[in-house]
Image (cartoon, helix red, strand yellow):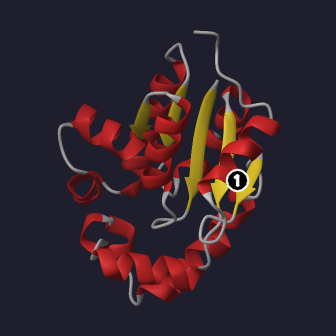
Amino acid sequence: MKLYLIGMPGSGKTTLGRTLAVHFGLPFLDLDAAIAAQAGQPIPALFQQHGEAWFRQLEAEVLRTVIGRPGPLVLATGGGTPCFHDNLSILNTSGLTVWLDVPVPVLAARLAAAAETSSRPLLAAAGPPAAWLRETLSARIRFYERARLRYAAATTPVSVLAAELQAAGFTLPDR
């Protein structure tokens, strides 16, 4: 089975994804890293050269390639991935989606502490991070809420999520 983590920038998709992959003994992939590898350029350069619409199309193509591969996987998507090109429907039908629901003040603090705004093109072009995060979450929440599970990533231990995943039917193939 495949496990897909969705949520806002700074919600911990990559960090938690790596942890869950180790916990379950599965491969881990960050979709943004796969996109950058395929394009041969970092995400900010792709946005700058081609724009968001072009990037979202490439993102959808890479996503479909990744989820079409056989075998289990833990995938950290980009924050906007579920919101374009019917990506969320494809994620929901091919695996288990988990929305990492983190409050905006926590997201803003994480992004500021990590000084990650320059590596996140939409955030880099915005004004104050908290305002952009609130506005973006407002636009994306209707997609995030369609995830199979919701995880309060800022407060719930990973062990609780792992148990919830198993209770929701996340099973591993016999090895």
Vertical order, 129 against 82 (above or below): below
Tell me which amino acid carries mark 1.
Val
Q: Is residue 85 visible?
A: no
Quarter holding the C terminus is: top right
Q: Residue at x 41, y 41 (%)?
A: 31
Q: Is residue 114 above or below residue 93?
A: below
Is 52 displayed left or right of 72 in the figure?
A: left
User: Horizontal placement of 142 versus 107: left or right?
Assistant: right
The percent position of residue 154, horizontal first and vertical second, equals 59, 71
| Residue 155 versus residue 106 in the image, above or below | above
- Is residue 117 visible from the viewing direction of this image? yes
Query: In the image, residue 78 lies at what x, y percent?
Result: 46, 52
Percent coordinates x, y for residue 53 in the rendering: 43, 52
To which quarter of the image does residue 173 belong? Answer: top right
Q: Residues within 10 Å of mark 1 (few under 14, many from 20)?
A: few
Q: Residue at x 64, y 51 (%)?
A: 159
Q: Secondary structure at mark 1?
A: helix
Vertical placement of 60 versus 53: above or below? above
Residue under the point 33% across and 81% down: 113
Q: Nearer the viewer, residue 55 or 133?
A: 133
Residue 102 placement: quadrant: bottom right
Q: Tell me what residue is drawn at x 24 percent, y 71 percent.
A: 118
User: Mark 1 = which residue?
Assistant: 160
Location of the N terminus (image quadrant) = top right
